[in-house]
Image (cartoon, grey):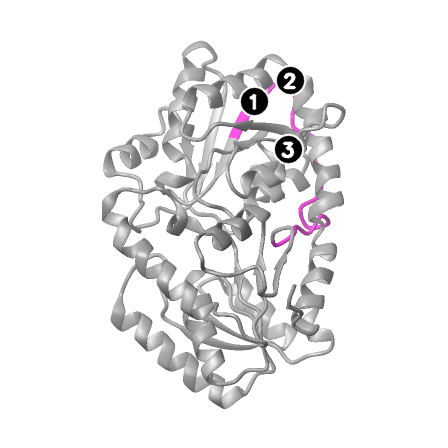
Amino acid sequence: MEELLVNHNVCVFTPKIHQIHVRKKLERLGISIYENDLNGSTISIFSDLAYIIKLFKLMRSLKPDVFFPYTFKPVIYGTLVANFCHVNRITPMLTGLGYSFLNTNSKKQVIKLITRTLLKISLKANKRTSLILQNKDDYNTLIRAGIINTNQAAHIVNGSGVDLSHYDYSEPEPGSLNFLMISRLINAKGVNEYYEAAKIILQKHPNVRFTLIGAYDPNVDAIDAALYNKIKAGNVIEYKGEVDDVRSFIKACSVVVLPSYYGEGVPRCILEGMAMGRAIITSDSVGCRETINLSSDQPSGFLVPIKNATCLAEKMLYFILNPLHIVSYGKNGRAYAFEKFDVRKVNLQMLQILEGPTVFA
């Protein structure tokens, strides 16, 4: 948004902003704020309809030149509304495909079918629309599912990028091993696997710490009450709840862990950990695998199979037994972040997409 403000007026249509510092910064930048009551994690016909009507009225009033929605509901509803209002340039961004393209249990099949159908309708090829994705896997998935075709304009960017000056380097403290997971408390993020891996490690290494940051998310894939209560008890994991600024927690940790199989774009928490010089353990799954440098001369972390707490514990044990590698892997990760995920490079690519002509491949 700051980059766009150099040559454009910028308005945001957002769910209620509860973080005062975020609101103040947007206001200080001169960004017009319009709020709504959309909840991206739950299903409500009335709430979604109210969102569509409010967005339609706002779009007719503002008459934007470019409409840039991201995440599923704004992409689906917003792109449909923007097409109806004949917005000149529509650049929807999917920051991962989430549950909609995972093999999930039957209770989610109807939701998945509805989402796929609406997505196909909203992303139907036209000269005004140019899709943005965060990894090649998502592009191939959408092609195979028939949501988009190879003739449509589509771009792949390296996630949302990370500000390497804001998330500055700090060397992990020697002698204090602390694994950190930053995630909403939903099953597909691998919360249970992290908990079970921590239990395995603590049997032989009781002084190792395991920290978890993130809000309990009451959506269809929320962790069950039993696991939530065990986490809150604090006997295995130190649960810190939701925080506004993760930097102090990353600085206090040794390794950042995200055993997700959610269908990520590029997980921001991993990029933040890399930027601050932390070794990474994540899953060999969509989006997550993009973040790890697996080269033999500059490795930055490990990929583990999804839903496998034993393998996750083995990689944790590697860092416990090889503490010097925590520092070297972390430095390699920061170098990889500079090379691939620097927000300035990502912003430049995003600006070219938002401002440039739609080009069909």
Residue 226's disc is none
Which one is nearer the viewer's eye here, 26 or 89?
A: 89
Name the residue tied to disc 3.
Answer: 278
Which of the numbered marks, if any, corresponds to residue 323?
A: 2
Queried whether the magenta region covers residue 165, the answer comes back as yes
The residue at 31%/44% (across/down) is 222
Task: Tell me the quarter of the picture where residue 24 sits.
Answer: bottom right
Q: Residue furthest toward the top?
A: 204
SS for callout 1: loop
Q: CA distance from mark 3 to mark 1?
A: 12 Å
Q: Position of residue 90 (x, y in %)?
A: 56, 74
Taking the image as drawn, is residue 15 in sight? no
Answer yes or no: do the residues labelled 3 and 2 have beta carbons within 8 Å? no
Q: Are marks 3 and 1 in contact (CB under 8 Å)?
A: no
Q: Secondary structure at mark 2?
A: helix
The percent position of residue 328, horizontal first and vertical second, equals 72, 25
Q: Earlier in the sequence, mark 3 or mark 1?
A: 1
Residue shown at the point (44%, 63%) measured from the top left: 18
Instruction: Provide residue 242's location: percent of width, then percent of height.
Output: 43, 47
Are the two marked residues, 2 and 1, in contact with CB atoms closer than 8 angstroms?
yes
Tell me which amino acid carries mark 1.
Leu
Instruction: Describe residue 344's horizontal placement relative to residue 314 as left or right.
Output: right
For label 3, the SS is: loop
Report the Cα–Cα distance between label 2 and label 1. Answer: 9 Å
Q: Is residue 247 above or below residue 125?
A: above
Q: Is residue 132 left or right of residue 297?
A: left
Q: Earlier in the sequence, mark 2 or mark 1?
A: 1
Three-letter code, disc 2: Pro
Please give the residue where the numbered disc 1 appears in the rendered image. 177
